[in-house]
Amino acid sequence: MCKDTQTAATDCQACVLLARAMDTTALAQSGFSDLGALCQAIQSACDQLAGIGQYLADDWINSLDGELETLATVRQTRQ
């Protein structure tokens, strides 16, 4: 091989490696973008579940308040 041919081959190999590196970087970027979207969906679902849990806890507190009032009334009538 003459020197020019070696230089061209080296440049071609460098271009192939550069293209592979760019593809790999773009794929990693896409993967992290998908991961970010997944984390946002998980956070949204957790916020919704926490809201439902809080609503149910408040509902139970109100139910138990009524139960306590009923029990207190029964106790007063028995004394």
Image: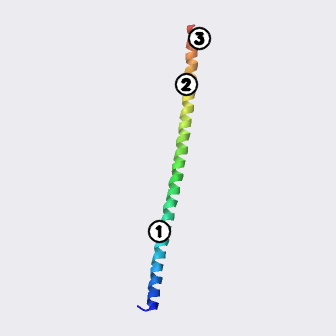
**Residue drawn where x is 53% and y is 37% of the image:** 53
Q: Amino acid at mark 1?
A: Thr
Q: Which residue reaches farthest left?
A: 1
User: SS class of the residue under badge 3?
Assistant: helix
Q: Earlier in the sequence, mark 3 or mark 1?
A: 1
**Residue drawn where x is 50% and y is 68% of the image:** 25
**Residue drawn where x is 54% and y is 48% of the image:** 44
Q: Badges 3 and 1: C-beta atoms under 8 Å apart? A: no
Point out residue 9 in the picture as x, y percentages from the top left corner.
44, 85
- Indicate left or right for 46 with 5 as reference: right
Point out residue 4 in the picture as x, y percentages from the top left corner.
46, 91
Of circles 1 and 2, the one toward us is 1
Q: Amino acid at mark 2?
A: Leu
Relative to 12, is 2 above or below?
Answer: below
Residue 66: mark? none
| Residue that carries the numbered disc 1 in the rendered image | 24
Q: Earlier in the sequence, mark 2 or mark 3?
A: 2
| Residue that carries the numbered disc 2 in the rendered image | 64
- Neighbour tally class for label 2: few under 14, some 14-19, many 20 plus, Cα within 10 Å: few
For the residues labelled 1 and 2, the Cα–Cα distance comes to 59 Å
Q: Please name whichever residue, 22 or 61, is drawn nearer the observer in this view of the structure.
A: 22
Q: Earlier in the sequence, mark 1 or mark 2?
A: 1
- Neighbour tally class for label 1: few under 14, some 14-19, many 20 plus, Cα within 10 Å: few
For the residues labelled 3 and 1, the Cα–Cα distance comes to 77 Å
| Residue that carries the numbered disc 3 in the rendered image | 76
Point out residue 45 in the picture as x, y percentages from the top left corner.
52, 46
Q: Please name whichever residue, 23 or 71, is drawn nearer the observer in this view of the structure.
A: 23
Count of numbered marks: 3
Of circles 3 and 1, the one toward us is 1
- Neighbour tally class for label 3: few under 14, some 14-19, many 20 plus, Cα within 10 Å: few
